[in-house]
Image (spheres, helix red, strand yellow):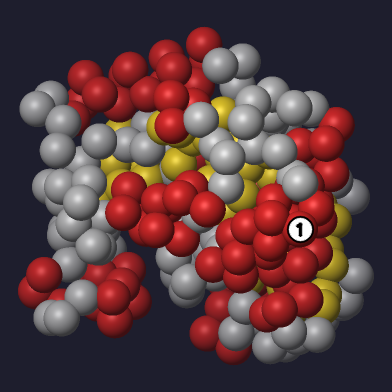
Amino acid sequence: MVETLKLIVVEDYKEMSRKAASIVADEIRKNKKLVLGLATGGTPLGLYGELIRMHKEEKLDFSGVKTFNLDEYLGLDPDNEQSYHYFMFHNFFNYVNVDRRNVHIPDGKAKDPNAFCVEYERMIKEAGGIDLQILGIGSNGHIAFNEPGSKADSRTRVVDLSEQTIRDNARFFKDEKEVPRKAISMGIGTIMEAKKIVLLASGKNKADAIAKTVEGMPTEEVPASLLQRHRDVTVIVDKEAASKLTRRQ
């Protein structure tokens, strides 16, 4: 583990979510025009719930914040309940005062997905780059949809999902056959350009990936492990996700 990677082990999922939300809130209070990179899936739901509470009870202001989501399934309409566009609005954006014009989510129905990926990179750069990127982690160590073997300098692109990821995500669909096989994803190189990164993980099924990420050698076979090379990464995990680490905090 390198010195720039800060590890925080907490008791449970709720504490992980609260800790992550406090970091996001502090960054927004310091910079009203924060460019915030966001993730989907089960892991950040608690974070979004806490940010919604802070907005309603503590007047946390999202009006100047710009957001960029990590990824989206290729082929799904924005109003499809399994799309990440739908996820973000129904679990977060609809409940805070974010300006819809400042919300950016990859377009799963883009007529030319490759051209869209180039445009997405341009939009991130035009916004001044991502100030704070929230990440989850897959059981195989993927971040966004950068599967094992993804290049360290990869940019936003169309990717093939691994069989492991398809199996992991099948729980959100009626049938595994409905899980899209491709997605648009920020690349590892794109993610690494964020000024600050917070990686979240909860549960025993993430313990192997977290051990390799925090204590293993950086390798493209475990994409999250490449975060060790970033200058400002905070990894927040509950006790179950930290259960295979040899050192704590």
Identify whether 165 is placed above or below 230: below
Query: Which residue position is annotated with label 1?
Result: 57
Identify whether 185 is placed above or below 55: above
Q: Residues within 10 Å of mark 1 (few under 14, many from 20)?
A: few
**Number of numbered tags placed on the structure image:** 1
Q: Position of residue 235 (x, y in %)?
A: 74, 60
Would residue 154 be found to the left or right of residue 95 on screen? left
Name which residue lies at 62% across and 31% down.
63
Residue 39 visible (yes or no): no
Q: Position of residue 234 (x, y in %)?
A: 78, 54
Name which residue lies at 52% across and 85% down.
205
Q: Position of residue 164 (x, y in %)?
A: 31, 73
Q: Residue furthest top?
A: 126
Q: Report the quarter where the N terminus lies.
A: bottom right
Q: Report the quarter where the C terminus lies.
A: bottom right
* Nearer to the camera, 244 or 38: 38
* Nearer to the camera, 127 or 181: 127
**Where is residue 45, by image quadrant?**
bottom right
* Nearer to the camera, 93 or 170: 93
Residue 177 visible (yes or no): yes
* Badge 1 amino acid: Glu
Identify whether 184 is placed above or below 79: above
Would residue 113 be found to the left or right of residue 215 on screen? left
Q: Position of residue 239 (x, y in %)?
A: 75, 85
Would residue 226 be found to the left or right of residue 172 on screen? right
* Nearer to the camera, 45 or 233: 45
Secondary element at tag 1: helix
Name which residue lies at 58% across and 54% down.
135
